[in-house]
Image (cartoon, grey):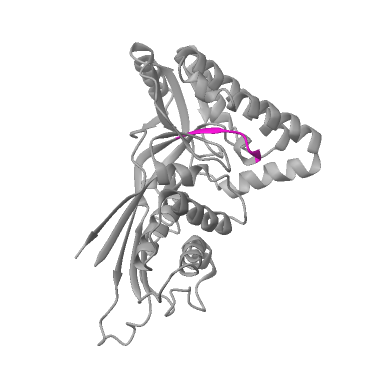
Amino acid sequence: MTIRTSAPGKLFLLGEYAVLEGAPALLTAVDRRVLVSIDDIDDLNDPASGAWQLTAAGLGIGIGIENLTLNTDGALPAGLDPRLRARLTLFDAVRETVLARAPRPVRPLRISIDSTAFSRGGHKLGLGSSAAVAVALTAALARSAGLDLGSEELFRLAHAAHRSAQNGTGSGGDVAASVYGGLIGYTPGADPVRLRWPAGLSLMAVVTGEGSLTTRLVGRVAEYAATDAAGYAADLSRLAGLAARAETALADPAGFLGLAADYFAALALLDAHAGAGIVTERHLELQAFAHREGGVFKTSGAGGGDVGLAFSLSGEPTERLSAALEAAGATVVPLGFSAPGLQEGSLE
């Protein structure tokens, strides 16, 4: 039997960084998906049939992984190139997390992971590919191991593996968006709240750079917290207060635009104090272009070179903003929002 799973990427709309301290965040799943397939390896004529095999595309190391032979328990083999080993940290974390709970021994597996939809021109867009991999791979391995996971348990296991692979960082919001899909309000430690996107508000995703390493940006903010606890607390309190208004603001598209603008300004202030690189000169240029057309631009997620967001009132204001962004040399990424969460299937 071939097990197939897929999980969507995400966009943080509001609440990034503040959510790391327990504040609520607003996220949407997007229609770029990680695809995972798993088959048993049962060829007794193959001397390597006792070992697992891994094929992975889209890991961002210049070349894909084709039929990498793993150990008989799926662990990464000794002597692996350090760069490749680093790229497979998440795979190994998911494997360990799932197998530790398996009710029976797992037969050798052939695993394929495809996350190429999360990159553009060889650069990642910042749509949460690692969280989507964690969710889709956790679900597929769990089925192979005889584990029947509900959404809550799937989130718990995928989040644990994801945090382990990222040295204990991450709020879990991106993992929740991949599990549950749609538009959600997410607060660490609480069940996600399903929300509806207002008809009068439009959203566009905009390419702003060549991708950023989330752990590096978050790490710099953590350094700021360690060296100036009072300043960090003031900056995060400002962000948290704004994030707490996000769900209510969805009922008022014009009010939501103002909230998004205020949140971006508060992020820029945090970045000015932390020197992390969350807000770039390109972001400020796009903010100015959007403001002139009555819209709002802000970063999404960790910021840096990852994809940004452009909000506007629906209809003619969206058309004006789209034209202005194009004239500014910006590229709007074609994305569908409020995408379905984890999807599973199998083939005999």
Q: Is residue 20 left or right of residue 131?
A: right
The x, y position of residue 195, in whole percent, is 42, 29
The residue that appears at 46% across and 29% down in the rendered structure is: 309
Q: Is residue 125 in view from this perspective?
A: no
Quadrant in which residue 265 is drawn? top right
Q: Is residue 173 in view from this perspective?
A: yes
Q: In the image, is residue 75 above or below residue 268?
A: below
The x, y position of residue 162, in whole percent, is 52, 55
Please, which residue is most extreme toward the left here? 348
- Image: magenta residue range: 21-27
The residue that appears at 80% across and 34% down in the rendered structure is: 230
The residue that appears at 62% across and 44% down in the rendered structure is: 217
The x, y position of residue 247, in whole percent, is 50, 25
The residue that appears at 40% across and 52% down in the rendered structure is: 150
Q: Is residue 238 left or right of residue 53?
A: right
Q: In the image, is residue 213 above or below residue 322?
A: below
Q: How many marks?
A: 0
The image quadrant where one finds the N terminus is: bottom left
Q: Is residue 229 left or right of residue 260?
A: right
Quadrant in which residue 139 is drawn? bottom left
Residue 266 on the magenta span:
no
The image quadrant where one finds the C terminus is: bottom left
Front residue (pair 66, 312) = 312
The x, y position of residue 61, in whole percent, is 45, 59
